[in-house]
Image (cartoon, coloured by chain):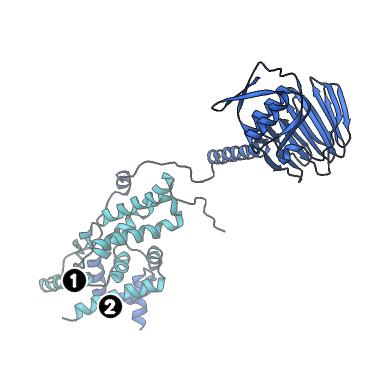
């Protein structure tokens, strides 16, 4: 039996450990879901403050879902169905530029299309897809983080990829 | 179909090198890689986790005791319980005290169904909780007892104590004088070294632990119960004191021999008639000043 040694997260060390473990994940999750407009880092921090205030009621094993739910709810409160804005950096691994100018132009067009396609994915798909593509998380890691099944993650990620391809091929 | 499962595996970073080679050979792969590369550009802003934790505006460890039942709270609860129990035991073991005013009588049924009729200006106290094992009561004044059969029943007065087993008797303790009349059964009276056992209808008067009179009193209940005070060869001052108690008045005597013995009675209902009955045999006259009554010789 895996009994919990602590029945709440009021100990600062435990709280700190949870913060270190999930702060980035939550911040990423909010960013991929709602974009940069809702200040994902602020929401993440607010969620942790709420966790501290309610530390007596939350066991360490429930902390993660408490944080995700709280952060998500805080964001929803502000969310007014604006189009998600993600900042796309230049693709990190630009290989040696030996393509023809024509190819480069086509690729630039593609880039805009892909960015728009990602922004118009459903929240669930986008979160799963970006956690997988950007953070390099495997399906089971994403599943553990979002508390959904591995199959569901696979469906969302693959579904997202298919939608994006459709956008490009549609030209 | 084959390609789709490969793509799924590719997405899950789960391709073997051989499978990757196969996928790279497909014409779609360039597009996939392209999409993946661009998506990777959507990286969430990086931040310093440790620094942001330090900046988190939360108060430092509020190490409050988590359990409701700390030793301190338990101690508080215990203290309250002890106090409550203390008050409970104190009040339940406290003596029951009954005091009658002037011109009043009161009837009391004791816990064992014995009964007491208490005459005016009398104090009676007993312990209700200890009554089963200890039928003790203390008396200062006059009372008539009907004692139920049972353990020893003791009436303590400052002028001596009366012990019985089950009987009817009257005790009168007034002005250092103890009068005990037995109506049924037998009664033991002890005062100091003096001890006397009374037979029914006998009466004894003691003063300062000495028997001053013992005689047969042919009544089957004290007359005061029926609203009449009776005296047989009693100093006149005792009659006057009793009169004061029954009518709640003050009597002054002028030029009266209060040591003279009086035999007779007065009723408790009518003060005028009662007054007449105690003064005419003694050939005295009465004058009134408000509540004060002055008795003087003719």
SS at mark 2 in the image? helix
Q: Residue at x 56, y 41 (%)?
A: B77
- Figure label count: 2
Q: Nearer the viewer, residue B205 or B266?
A: B266
Q: Nearer the viewer, residue A153 or B72?
A: B72
Q: Residue furthest bottom?
A: B1
Task: Name the residue carrying label 1.
Answer: A116
Of circles 1 and 2, the one toward us is 1
Q: Is residue B87 above or below residue B263?
A: below
Q: Residue at x 69, y 42 (%)?
A: B107
Q: Is residue B285 left or right of residue A168?
A: right
- Quadrant where the C terminus of chain B is found in the figure: top right
Q: Residue at x 26, y 79 (%)?
A: B27
Q: Nearer the viewer, residue A74 or B162?
A: B162
Q: Position of residue A126 (x, y in %)?
A: 28, 69
SS at mark 1 in the image? helix
Chain ID, mark 1: A
Q: Is residue B250 above or below residue A5?
A: above
Q: Is residue B149 left or right of residue A84?
A: right
Q: Which chain is blue?
A: B
* Badge number at residue B181: none
Q: CA distance from mark 1 to mark 2?
A: 14 Å
Q: Residue furthest front?
A: B298
Q: Which chain is cyan?
A: A
Chain ID, mark 2: A
Q: Within the image, what quadrant is residue B135 found in?
A: top right
Q: Within the image, what quadrant is residue B2 found in?
A: bottom left
């Amino acid at each position: 039996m895996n009994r919990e040694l602590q029945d709440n997260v009021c100990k600062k060390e435990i709280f700190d450990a949870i913060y270190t473990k999930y702060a980035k994940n939550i911040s990423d999750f909010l960013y991929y879901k709602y974009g940069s407009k809702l200040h994902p880092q602020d929401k993440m921090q607010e969620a942790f403050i709420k966790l501290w205030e309610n530390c007596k009621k939350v066991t360490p094993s429930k902390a993660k879902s408490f944080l995700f739910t709280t952060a998500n709810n805080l964001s929803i409160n502000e969310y007014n169905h604006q189009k998600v804005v993600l900042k796309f950096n230049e693709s990190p691994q630009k290989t040696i530029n030996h393509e023809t100018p024509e190819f480069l132009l086509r690729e630039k067009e593609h880039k805009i299309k892909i960015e728009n396609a990602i922004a118009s994915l459903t929240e669930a798909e986008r979160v799963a897809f970006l956690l997988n593509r950007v953070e390099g998380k495997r399906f089971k890691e994403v599943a553990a983080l979002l508390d959904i099944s591995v199959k569901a993650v696979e469906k969302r990620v693959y579904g997202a990829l298919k939608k994006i391809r459709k956008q490009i091929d549609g030209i | 179909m084959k390609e789709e499962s490969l793509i799924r595996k590719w997405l899950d970073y789960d391709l073997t090198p051989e499978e990757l080679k196969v996928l790279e050979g497909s014409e779609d792969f360039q597009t996939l890689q392209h999409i993946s590369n661009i998506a990777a550009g959507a990286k969430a802003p990086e931040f310093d986790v440790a620094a942001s934790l330090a900046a988190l505006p939360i108060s430092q460890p509020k190490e409050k005791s988590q359990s409701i039942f700390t030793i301190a709270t338990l101690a508080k609860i215990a203290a309250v319980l002890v106090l409550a129990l203390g008050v409970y035991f104190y009040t339940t073991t406290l003596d029951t005290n009954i005091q009658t005013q002037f011109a009043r009588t009161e009837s009391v049924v004791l816990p064992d169904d014995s009964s007491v009729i208490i005459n005016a200006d009398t104090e009676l106290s007993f312990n209700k909780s200890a009554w089963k094992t200890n039928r003790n009561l203390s008396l200062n004044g006059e009372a008539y007892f009907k004692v139920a059969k049972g353990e020893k029943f003791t009436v303590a007065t400052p002028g001596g104590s009366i012990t019985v087993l089950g009987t009817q008797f009257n005790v009168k303790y007034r002005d250092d004088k103890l009068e005990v009349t037995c109506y049924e059964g037998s009664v033991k009276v002890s005062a100091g070294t003096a001890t006397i056992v009374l037979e029914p209808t006998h009466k004894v008067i003691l003063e300062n632990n000495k028997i001053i009179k013992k005689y047969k009193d042919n009544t089957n209940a004290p007359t005061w119960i029926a609203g009449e005070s009776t005296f047989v060869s009693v100093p006149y001052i005792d009659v006057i004191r009793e009169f004061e108690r029954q009518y709640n008045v003050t009597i002054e005597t002028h030029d009266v021999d209060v040591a003279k013995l009086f035999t007779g009675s007065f009723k408790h209902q009518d003060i005028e008639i009662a007054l007449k009955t105690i003064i005419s045999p003694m050939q005295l006259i009465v004058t009134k000043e408000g509540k004060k009554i002055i008795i003087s010789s003719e």
